Image (cartoon, helix red, strand yellow):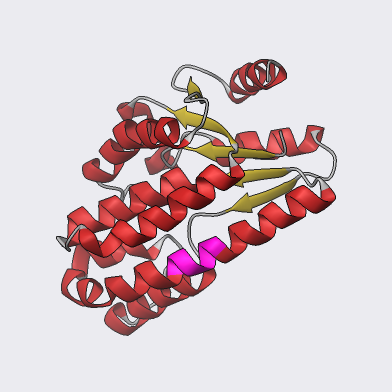
Amino acid sequence: MAIIVFIGPPGAGKSTQMKLLAKLVRDAKILNVKRGFLASLLERALVRFIYGRYTSTYPLPLLLHGARVTLRKIIPLWYFINTMEIVARITIMYIINKVFKKIFLVEDYIPAIIADYFYLQRQLNVPLTSIRRYITILTKFHILTQPKIIVLTAQRQELLRRWNIRGRSEYSALYLSIFEKIIPLIATLLSKDSTHLLVDTTNMTIQETFHVLLRELAKT
């Protein structure tokens, strides 16, 4: 099991659990494969152009809040750039994994990317056909790599509490709904064995969650 993927809504504990697991796995490499560098650069440049300032948080929520018309015009370019860069990064990761047996701990993999694509498509009211080709491409790469998927989640009120603590309260109810309902479904559909590990961290400490993950991973 050389590629372990952590997906779920912001605040569910993905980054924290990945760091803990990386301490136990020698030479494990932590990656975030959700947003390409060029797509992120495009978002931040747009924020700078429209608002005249830099943002330290993810730019998309800010753009969706006050720059929908402009974002809708460039979203086809964003989909293309992000998909091509993600495909390139996954290809490199897959080759390194196969040739050098490198273990990767990946945050926000293809199911999360597809959910993001659906979210933007609905928010901007662009044709579904505009993202179909990119979803097909990403699906093929997910089937190729076949990672072990761990879905971390929490009850809505707990997520909102964690978001406020972290200063990330800009996420919408629609965004959360997609992660609650669509992510596990996509993860199941894209897995050959139709299984993935789902952990609700609402009433669990960081260490309790970590022990559950270790126990489940030991079974595979």
User: Where is 167 relative to 218, above or below?
Assistant: below
Residue 167 at least partly seen: no
- Closest to the observer, 14 or 56: 14
Please tell me which residue is depicted at 74% across the width and 39% down the height of the picture: 22
How far from the left and from the top, in percent, is residue 99? 81, 52
How far from the left and from the top, in percent, is residue 36? 51, 65
Please tell me which residue is depicted at 22% across the width and 77% down the height of the picture: 73
Residue 140 lies within the magenta run:
no
Image position of 42 (left or right of 67): right
How far from the left and from the top, in percent, is residue 121? 23, 57
Residue 83 lies within the magenta run:
yes
Please tell me which residue is depicted at 52% across the width and 51% down the height of the picture: 141
Image position of 168 (left or right of 142): left
User: Where is 54 relative to 129, above or below?
Assistant: below
Quarter of the image that includes the C terminus: top right
How far from the left and from the top, in percent, is residue 200? 45, 21
Q: Specify start and end residues of the magenta stretch as a single range.
A: 82-87
- Closest to the observer, 193 or 9: 193
Please tell me which residue is depicted at 34% across the width and 78% down the height of the picture: 46
Q: Is the magenta stretch mostly helix, strand or loop?
A: helix
- Closest to the observer, 196 or 22: 196
